[in-house]
Structures are given as C-alpha cells and as structure tokens.
Amino acid sequence: MIVCTDRTAFAERVLPGELQWRRADIDTIDRELAVIAGRIFGQSDIFCCEINSFHEFHHLLIVEYAEKSQYDLTVTLCKENIDLPHGVLCFAGSGRSFHGQRNRVWNSPPGNIYLTAFFAPGREIDHFGPGFIILPAVSVIDTIDSIPGLEGQASTKWVNDILIDGAKVAGVLTYTSAMGSDVTGVVLGIGLNVETKPRISPDPFAPKAASLSDYAKDTGLCNLKIVLGSLIDHLSRNYRLLTDNRYADLLDVYRRRSAVIGEEVTICTDDVDSGSEVVASGVVEAIGENLELHLKGRSKPITRGRLILRL
C-alpha cells in the first residue's frame, strides 16, 4: 500500500513499522490518485512510502488536520464522474466541517479516527444499498471486538450509530453511485472515538458520547495505531464478503448486535429544516432484509427516520 502524507511525524504515530519516506509531488503521483491527492493536500509538501498490506486498499492519504470533510470531498469527485482508483483510504487526525447524517456536526478532536474509504467495484452487488450501510457498521463492531476487554460490548443503533453502554462511540456514512446494475463508486465515512471523548450537546437521539478508552481495560492496547490497523483489515474483509454475495452474513451480525431489537423506541422524521415529528412508537420486533424496522402491532415497516431508544 502506498502511503502519502504532509506530516510524516503524525503518520508514524498511526502506522506500524519503520517507514522510509521520499518526497513527492502531484506530478509524480499516480495519475488517477493525483486528483484526490491534490484536493486533500493542496499546496503542502507530500511525502510517500510503501508498506506491506494484504487487503483491499492500495492507497492511504493521511493528514493531521483536515480543513474540509474528506468524505464530502470524495463524494463530490464521484458526482463529478472523476475516475478514482479502487481502494483509497483518507485518514484525518482531526479537522473541521466533519458531520454525520444530514450534515449534523460531528465533533472531531485529536485522538480519534476520521476515515473515508473509496471503492470502485464496477460490478453488480446484491443488496448494495443496505449492504454498504451495514459494511462500515459491522466493521466497527468487529474492530471493537478485537480490543481486549471490549469483546461483545458494542451494539448497532438503527441505522448508522455504534453504542457502548448506551453511549455513542461511532457513526458511519455511506454514498453509492451506480450505472445500470453495476455499482461504480462507494464512499464510506467512519468517525470512531478512540482516545478522546468528544463534547456534545446531548439530545434524545444521542444522549451521551464516549470513547473506546473509556471502557478498555488496557488503554495501551486501545490506541490509534492499533485500532486504525484493525479497522482497515475488517473493512477489507467485510467488503470481500459483500462482493462475494454474502450480504446475509453481514446482516446477521448487524441484527445480532442490534441495540434496538426487543426495545421500546420512538421514530421521528429526519428533516433538518422543519425539525422532528414523531412518526411511530413501539417495540422493535425485527430488522428486515433491507434494514426496515418492524414494530410490534404495526403492519407497515419503518424505512427512514431518526430513532430514540428508550433505555
């Protein structure tokens, strides 16, 4: 995997092994990568190295501080039909203009993971819509399970939050583009609180936030370097499951680790401009094949909205 950064000291804090850097510029970088690298690094000096990897990703772009959301930047390139190479990761140590669903502010202090992943499958993928929502969520669950003392503690809150003990530790975003039956581009955004608990304004949808280090028995085994490496590995593995038509395997994990099945919930509209109104309340009986929520006593499933979990 080729790593590019404008801050080698920071990159060495989050990557394993001895790294041999060489100075580079946009003109010497792979042509397809140059567009996104130019948007991310701007006029900064760029340094590159290669590290051994055995996963789906071929390029990793690292900045210590991102002036703009790398997720938004990559989505924009997709919408502009810019050809990007398959298997690109963009990692920021912190930044501004980061957000969750519906552009809700995502507080982004240093010490946490702000990761964007791009795939260019160029093929038909079964259940690609819900599949690429589930993929990053399950990958975060798998990553947390790999940390000693945190096995089995994380759960999924419909549709794209990850909780530990009722506190939000991660959120994921997904954008997909298709041409006919072929999925041409996928952008995943992952915010995972590792070492720092962000300050938030509590509300019924996210009453509290936490970081993994708040729960880890040994914080030495729960740092950016370890967690980032594990997350990249699990993203790669679960991407291959999805493209091997094993959506059901990912859905099974998502369901088994659900924080909402069997619980009393309230579903509200998800309109930033007009505010939230209650759509339905009740006990969640099941999560359907396309992530729809089935509430007890309600014939019509819920397919969209914001969820309040009544714990």
Image (cartoon, rainbow, N blue to C red):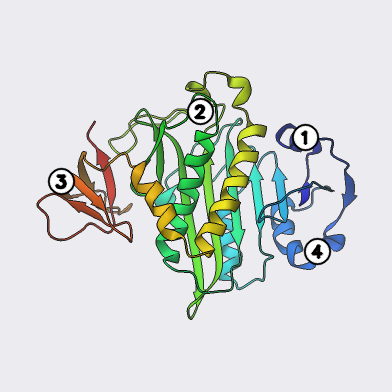
Q: Residues within 10 Å of mark 4 (few under 14, many from 20)?
A: few
Reading the image, the residue beneath label 3 is 281
Secondary structure beneath label 4: loop
Reading the image, the residue beneath label 2 is 212
Residue at (54% x, 63% y) in the render: 186
Secondary structure beneath label 1: helix
Q: Amino acid at mark 2?
A: Leu
Reading the image, the residue beneath label 4 is 30
Q: Nearer the viewer, mark 2 or mark 4?
A: 2
Q: Position of residue 263 (x, y in %)?
A: 21, 38
- Judging depth in this view, the residue of 130 and 81 nearest the camera is 130
Q: Is residue 176 above or below residue 310?
A: below
Tell me, yes or no, whether the two marked residues, 2 and 3, touch with CB atoms within 8 Å. Answer: no
Q: Position of residue 206 (x, y in %)?
A: 34, 36
Q: Residues within 10 Å of mark 1 (few under 14, many from 20)?
A: few
Q: Amino acid at mark 1?
A: Glu
Q: Is residue 250 visible?
A: yes
Residue at (59% x, 71% y) in the render: 80
Residue 63 appears left or right of 263: right
Reading the image, the residue beneath label 1 is 12
Q: Earlier in the sequence, mark 2 or mark 3?
A: 2
Q: Position of residue 159 (x, y in %)?
A: 35, 49
Secondary structure beneath label 3: strand
Tell me, yes or no, whether the two marked residues, 2 and 4, touch with CB atoms within 8 Å. Answer: no
Residue 70 appears left or right of 64: left
Q: Earlier in the sequence, mark 4 or mark 1?
A: 1
What is the CA distance from the residue labelled 2 to the residue labelled 1?
Answer: 21 Å
Q: Earlier in the sequence, mark 1 or mark 3?
A: 1
Residue at (57% x, 32% y) in the render: 109
Tell me, yes or no, whether the two marked residues, 1 and 3, touch with CB atoms within 8 Å. Answer: no
Q: Is residue 157 visible?
A: no
What is the CA distance from the residue labelled 2 to the residue labelled 4?
Answer: 36 Å
